[in-house]
Image (cartoon, rainbow, N blue to C red):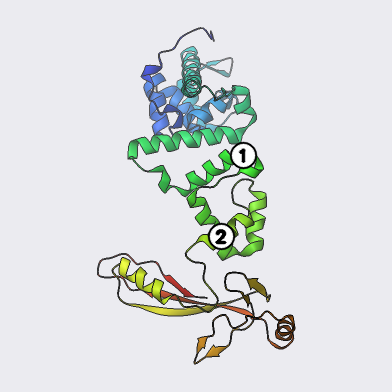
């Protein structure tokens, strides 16, 4: 193949490199006809990338398979009991390969020209790193979907998650940054999975999740920084008013926890002892003291709480409205 030949790429769809399945086969038929399309289809070569990764699409004709007899008859000449692919089909393969490679190179050149600080990606780098090639295919398909469906990429958490990881891998480890959606996901993962689960995932997915110290700051700065035994009735009232809701029901759930005592600097109290009740209501900031002897007595005489009790309020939706989110009333 002469590399100096200039191909007219205007005949190709802009999204040709992300076509899949029947769309790809229709494209092949329109460019080089049915025979080559049928050869690709029977081998499930259903995308441009799969096509370019296949070293010899005619290798299948070396095998004596009954299902290939009709295809061999259409695409090959039988010479001395051997099937030889017709020269026209070979030329079609050469032409299609050259077109797609030229389109791929033009796309990379355009991306390079759009931002001079970006380095051109070599074919050797792409071939040696299948994950990079898959990532480029995914971004191309996502961009095509966005353009055609007018969808907002910010709605896709997967997109934000992958963007965050790839950007952080190019930054120093002490300068990792995280989008708001990733921070929210990290908080939920920490709350639902616990510290050990969170750390296991964070350590093995470099650049994906913030450090625990950053996570603790997010918790402290959030509006959900609940104090032990305190009921958020005022916040619940504001939540119901803002959502135009009036009725709901309260449920209680408990979960076993590792028994431990810690000092809460915000309330100047010790958290983790079993909270005493007054008329069925938890006594707030009960374990406050400046005396080491009193703290020592608490440790020896008062049980550490084995359970975490959660009270949730589930608002009831109005007619034809979606189900509103539950509200964390107390913990």
Q: Which mark is residue 189?
A: 2
Farthest residue to the left: give it.
Answer: 319
Identify the residue shown where x is 51% and y is 71%: 226
Identify the residue shown where x is 52% and y is 67%: 225
Whole-percent x and y of residue 207?
61, 45
Q: Is 111 left, or right, of 268 in this rendering?
A: left
Q: Earlier in the sequence, mark 2 or mark 1?
A: 1
Identify the residue shown where x is 46% and y is 78%: 231
Residue topped by disc 1: 169
Could you say whether the residue bearing mark 1 is in a helix, strand or loop?
Answer: helix
Whole-percent x and y of residue 85?
52, 17
Report the front residue among 289 and 46: 289
Q: Is 199 left, or right, of 34 in this rendering?
A: right
Could you say whether the residue bearing mark 2 is in a helix, strand or loop?
Answer: helix
Vertical order, 256 against 29 (above or below): below
> In what quadrant of the picture does the N terminus appear?
top right
- Mark 2 near mark 1, Cβ–Cβ under 8 Å? no
Mark 2 neighbour density, 10 Å: few (under 14) some (14–19) many (20 or more): some
Report the front residue among 278 and 312: 278
Q: Is residue 21 visible?
A: no
Report the front residue among 63 and 196: 196
Q: Which mark is residue 235?
A: none
Whole-percent x and y of residue 126?
60, 28
- Distance from disc 2 to disc 1, alpha carbons, whole Å, reads 22 Å
Whole-percent x and y of residue 289?
65, 81
Identify the residue shown where x is 41% and y is 43%: 153
Q: Is residue 87 visible?
A: yes
Farthest residue to the front: give it.
Answer: 290
């Amino acid at each position: 193949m002469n590399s100096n030949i200039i191909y007219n790429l205007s005949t190709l769809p802009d999204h040709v490199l992300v076509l899949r399945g029947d769309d790809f086969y229709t494209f092949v038929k329109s460019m080089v006809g049915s025979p080559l399309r049928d050869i690709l289809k029977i081998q499930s070569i259903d995308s441009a990338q799969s096509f370019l990764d296949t070293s010899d699409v005619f290798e299948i004709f070396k095998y004596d398979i009954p299902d290939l007899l009709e295809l061999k008859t259409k695409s090959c000449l039988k010479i001395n009991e051997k099937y030889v692919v017709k020269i026209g089909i070979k030329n079609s393969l050469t032409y299609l390969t050259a077109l797609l490679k030229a389109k791929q190179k033009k796309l990379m050149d355009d991306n390079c020209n759009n931002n001079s600080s970006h380095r051109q990606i070599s074919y050797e780098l792409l071939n040696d790193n299948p994950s990079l090639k898959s990532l480029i295919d995914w971004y191309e398909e996502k961009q095509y979907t966005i353009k055609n469906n007018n969808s907002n990429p910010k709605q896709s958490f997967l997109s934000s998650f992958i963007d965050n990881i790839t950007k952080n891998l190019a930054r120093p480890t002490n300068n990792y940054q995280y989008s708001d959606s990733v921070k929210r996901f990290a908080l939920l993962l920490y709350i639902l999975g616990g510290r050990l689960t969170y750390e296991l995932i964070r350590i093995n997915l470099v650049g994906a999740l913030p450090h625990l110290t950053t996570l603790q700051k997010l918790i402290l700065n959030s509006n959900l920084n609940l104090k032990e035994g305190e009921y958020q009735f005022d916040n619940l009232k504001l939540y119901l008013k803002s959502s135009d809701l009036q009725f709901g029901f309260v449920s209680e759930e408990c979960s076993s926890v590792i028994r431990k005592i810690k000092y809460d600097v915000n309330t100047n109290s010790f958290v983790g002892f079993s909270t005493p009740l007054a008329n069925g209501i938890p006594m707030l900031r009960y374990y406050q003291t400046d005396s080491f002897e009193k703290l020592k007595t608490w440790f020896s005489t008062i049980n550490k709480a084995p359970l975490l009790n959660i009270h949730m309020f589930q608002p009831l939706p109005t007619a034809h409205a979606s189900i509103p989110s539950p509200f964390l009333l107390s913990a």
